[in-house]
């Protein structure tokens, strides 16, 4: 399944107001992880409409991925 990153961003923008502020970072990270499993993470990286929560979650996710690759 290939998901357009704009759909993810739009869904996030709709749902984030229902997520308590202090849980948004974890929720955004879960969205990024879901997208990586079901889409092309490079497309999400190239998306210029990410809000601060999704952008930080994406950066954290990619850093963790780089750290795991460095271990091998």
Image: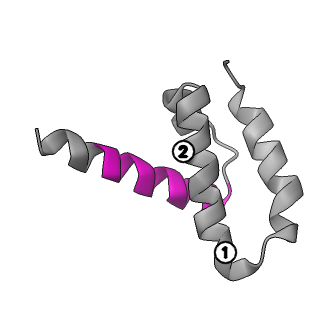
Left or right: where 56 falls relative to 3 = left
Q: What residue did someone put label 1 on? A: 23
Q: Which secondary structure is most common in the magenta stretch?
A: helix
Left or right: where 60 falls relative to 22 = left
Nearest the viewer among 71 and 60 is: 71
Identify the residue at horizontal 60%, vertical 68% (top origin): 25
- Tell me where residue 68 appears, x and y as whole percent: 23, 45
- Indicate the quadrant containing the C terminus: top left, top right, bottom left or bottom right: top left
Residue 35 placement: quadrant: top right
- Tell me where residue 22 appears, x and y as whole percent: 66, 81
For label 2, the crowd category at 10 Å Cα-Cα, with few meaning under 14, some 14 to 19 and many 20 or more, is some
The span from disc 1 to disc 2 (Cα, nearest Å) is 16 Å
- Tell me where residue 42 appears, x and y as whole percent: 49, 29
Marks 1 and 2: CB-CB under 8 Å?
no
Task: Specify the label residue 60 is tagged with.
Answer: none
Does any portion of residue 37 appear in the rendered image?
Answer: yes
For label 1, the crowd category at 10 Å Cα-Cα, with few meaning under 14, some 14 to 19 and many 20 or more, is few
Identify the residue at horizontal 70%, vertical 25% (top origin): 3
Q: Is residue 35 above or below residue 38?
A: below
Residue furthest bottom in the image: 22
Task: Specify the label residue 33 is tagged with.
Answer: 2
Residue furthest top in the image: 1
Kind of element beneath mark 2: helix
Query: Residue 62 magenta-drawn?
Result: yes
Does any portion of residue 46 appear in the rendered image?
Answer: no
Left or right: where 25 falls relative to 69 = right
Identify the residue at horizontal 42%, vertical 57% (top origin): 60
The range drawn in magenta is 51-65
- Tell me where residue 64 appears, x and y as whole percent: 33, 52
Kind of element beneath mark 1: helix
């Amino acid at each position: 399944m290939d998901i357009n990153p704009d759909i993810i961003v739009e869904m996030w923008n709709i749902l984030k107001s229902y997520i308590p502020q202090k849980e948004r970072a974890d929720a955004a990270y879960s969205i990024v992880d879901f997208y990586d499993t079901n889409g092309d993470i490079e497309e999400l990286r190239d998306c210029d409409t990410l809000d601060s929560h999704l952008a930080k979650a994406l950066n954290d996710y990619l850093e963790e991925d780089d750290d795991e690759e460095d271990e091998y």
